[in-house]
Image: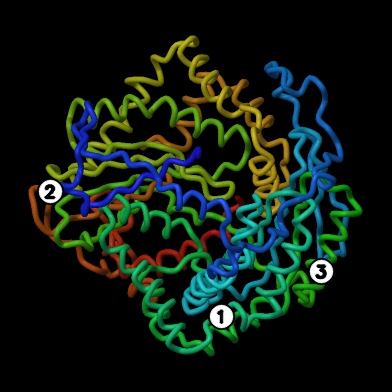
Amino acid sequence: SNTMVTVVSKSFQGKTKLKEKWYDTAYNVEAIPSAVLREWETPPKAGKLGFNYPKPNVFIPSENELKVLKPPPKNSNVPKTFEDRMKPVAAPKIIRDDGENGKWTVFFKQDDQFGQPKAFVIFELLNSTPYSSPKNAALATLYELCASDSLNEYTYDANLAGLGYTFTVLPRGVRLTFGGYSSKIPDFAAYVSRKLAADVRDVLPKNAAEFDRYKDTIMRALASFDAKQPYAHAIYYSNLSLTPTKFSYTNAELRESLSACTLSDLTAYVQNVWSSGKGEALVQGNFDEKEALALVNSLDNALGFRAIPPEQYPPRLKALPFPLGQPTQFRMPEINASNNNAAVQVLFQSLGNSEKDHMLIELLTAIIEEPFYNELRTKQQLGYIVASGVKAVEETRCLSLIVQSSVVPAKNLTEAIFKFFDSFRSIRLEKITKLELSLIVKGLLDRKLQPDKQLSVQATRNWSEITNGRFRFDRVQREASALLDITKEDILNFWDTTLAADAVGGRRVFISEVIPRTGVASSTAPVKSTGYASNVKKGNNQESTRNSLGGLALGVDDIEQFRRSREEQMKTIAL
């Protein structure tokens, strides 16, 4: 026999005679009786023992299906030169355009780079229903969870065979993404789409009790927001201040709306979400045009929506502009009373949407990252979390500075951040050498021009250009070219006109402070409203709601009015 069976149990304690030499593990070695071995040689059929073998996995492609339609060039594995990386990859092309009043716009790109029998497909049905209210946003989360859970049994075999999907309800519509072996995607995509859009009752809770379980899961997830770190709360409210009201709702609004949702609400919501819209699609990978169009037709039949006119298209996301002038300051008490950390995030906003504007922010962030950490974390030891980075919302960029501390109040953290930032021009930027700048630029270029290693990465980047309506499929090369052209004078000029405290007309800055209730870093609890919201509604002067820096002062209850006011202001700003 060539079988060794190992049995481990506490019941063998005191019944063994041997010990292995390394860990003194007690054990015995016994021969398997000959009668048992003979019985194993003629085992009964699995069915008689109550076992059922798994059914064949229909998602595993056959050998004939594993054919690459367009193999990559023979030299594709040769490392690319800088000149090669500066050449844009061929962009997707439109293979179906039903017009503004039609149903679909379909982009297609046949893979000629990765040489695998795989594809990546993204469909989005655009309409304004999903996030039209806090209640709809809460129902969107419920729908995602219920649908994913219900489809698990069907998609399990697909996942084992390397086929996957994601389903997301977004502010501008619903999105389905499929990836895996191209030969199996059409049937898989059609089934999932049909279940989600047509056979909706199959993916929704069967009764109120099941619905309540899903609702409780999401309510727990929303409640976990309270236990997050203060810096996460600071970031959350900064993000809200940047986002239009129909694209994001507060945690409190979602909780309140979710508590009132019923199963009938969810059913009506799902049917409405799929009833109409504008379809956008990207089919990329191991398909030809005919197969791509057939795939979209199959999805169209499964979804069965009606087209909408252009005036009903949902608006694209645009970042809200911060007030120009002195910094806007938002202050809130830490939600978790037991957390004694103070946290501050400061965002310096640039509304420039050119590649050069974006690269200047990225370059400045790269220059500022190490000195900011060394000064506030290593030297001043203000907090254990000190970070900087770029915050991007569509074409708007913000330079972000974050500090969290258990020993220094939020007010002092804010002062330290501004003291560092407002002296950075003279201390560092004016002294930076051509060699230092070129090394930083080279590091950014190396990361930016790194060739795509997976089809999904390239397809996702192409999709982001489609969904934001910019269609700059060569954005990476454009940004790299802009980066190469940036000089020290460009950096100083950008600083002086956009980020400096004495910039003409002022700068756009948002401060988000979280104040703990106890501990060394605590301070006077901020008010829920500074009076900003009520003053705006009454049309009163805002001087009474100014902070010590001369800008607007906001509390938690003022954020929604602030966002609505910035939406109005955005209409007058040429972005």
Residue placed at 61% from the left, 55% from the top? Answer: 159
Residue placed at 33% from the left, 37% from the top? Answer: 387
- Mark 3 or 1, closer to the camera: 1
How far is the residue under mark 3 from the one under mark 1? 27 Å
From the top left corner, tell me how far across and down residue 265 is, in percent.
53, 87
Among the 4 quarters of the image, the one containing residue 377: top left
Q: Front-most of 460 and 241?
A: 460
Residue placed at 82% from the left, 49% from the top? Answer: 108
Q: Front-most of 554 and 512?
A: 512
174 relative position to 265: left or right: right
Among the 4 quarters of the image, the one containing residue 555: bottom left
Kind of residue at badge 2: Ala
Kind of residue at badge 1: Leu
Q: Front-most of 96 and 78?
A: 78
How far is the residue under mark 1 from the one under mark 2? 47 Å
- Which element is circle 2 on? loop
**Residue beneath label 3, please?**
103
- Which element is circle 1 on? loop
Q: Is residue 506 visible?
A: no
**Residue beneath label 2, please?**
521
Up/down of 8 relative to 123, above or below: above
Residue placed at 65% from the left, 52% from the top? Answer: 161
Give me the disc on residue 371: none
Give the class, few, some or many, for how many residues have Cα within 10 Å of label 1's Cα (few <14, many ≥20): many
- Which element is circle 3 on? loop
From the top left corner, tell me how far across and down residue 63 is, in percent.
80, 44
